[in-house]
Image (spheres, rainbow, N blue to C red):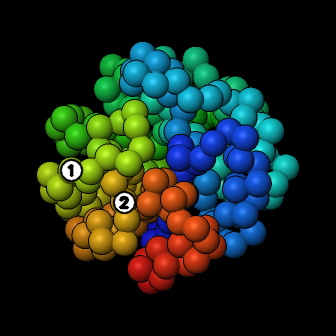
Amino acid sequence: MNNRVAPSVLGLRHADMRGKVAELIECGAELIHFDVMDGQFVPPITFGSQLIEGLRDLGRTFFEAHLMTLTPDRHFQAFADAGCQRVTFHAEATPHAHRLVQALHDLGLQAWVAINPGTPVEAVRGVIDIVDLVLVMTVNPGWGGQEFIHSALEKVRQIRSWAPEIDIEVDGGIDADTLSLCKRVGANVFVVGHYLTKQADLAAGLRELVGLCA
């Protein structure tokens, strides 16, 4: 288990996407985080597996698809085919989280499960021994640039107490200050979108955040 930053493309214009993702990869990003929204689980619609497939030739950096969708398992194969190594689905989107984890593993993918700010942390306890990572949303999913929800810190702390070795990712409102707060309670993967993509120098912004992970 190590600390790392996962830049999110949510704040990037589609016209700039290829160049900016290439820049992030060139300056050492270990993960690229793709927020996939269906207009039903969350109001906005973003993009599908085709965008990720079109970027896969940029390098070997891990691509993670965060499926904020009502029927995530219908799309697992498409994201596997697009070149994602990791897929996250929401516990709120299915009564069969255990089966969905198994389905992702059968495709050779890492299986990550997410919970929203209003969802009790107990929603992930039944699969914590088989998932590869738990994602704690630190804003309500759907839009970038929201204010960090501090009550999520206790969820991170609880998950870490249950599973000392599991990866715990936080997503939403992450900047230099909140990254440090999340790290202190046990998070080790930090999705950064708006704070990073608004920086004039992406490489310098990423270096700053990676330095805080040390």
The span from disc 1 to disc 2 (Cα, nearest Å) is 10 Å
Q: Secondary structure at mark 2?
A: loop
Q: Earlier in the sequence, mark 1 or mark 2?
A: 1
Describe residue 113's horizontal placement relative to residue 103 as left or right.
left
Q: Quickly name the residue at label 1.
A: 149
Q: Looking at the picture, does residue 52 appear above or below residue 150?
A: above
Dot 2 amino acid type? Ile
**Residue at 36% across, 36% down:** 141
Which residue is at the front of the view, 66 or 186?
A: 66
**Label 2 crowd bin: few (<14), some (14–19), many (20+), radius 10 Å:** many
Find residue 71 and report its horizontal and vertical position in percent.
Answer: 48, 17
Q: Looking at the picture, does residue 130 appear above or below residue 27?
A: above
Q: Secondary structure at mark 1?
A: loop
Find residue 210 and report its horizontal and vertical position in percent.
Answer: 50, 76
Disc 1 vs disc 2: Cβ atoms closer than 8 Å? no
Describe residue 148's horizontal placement relative to residue 199 as left or right.
left
Q: Quickly name the residue at label 2.
A: 174
**Residue at 42% across, 44% down:** 144
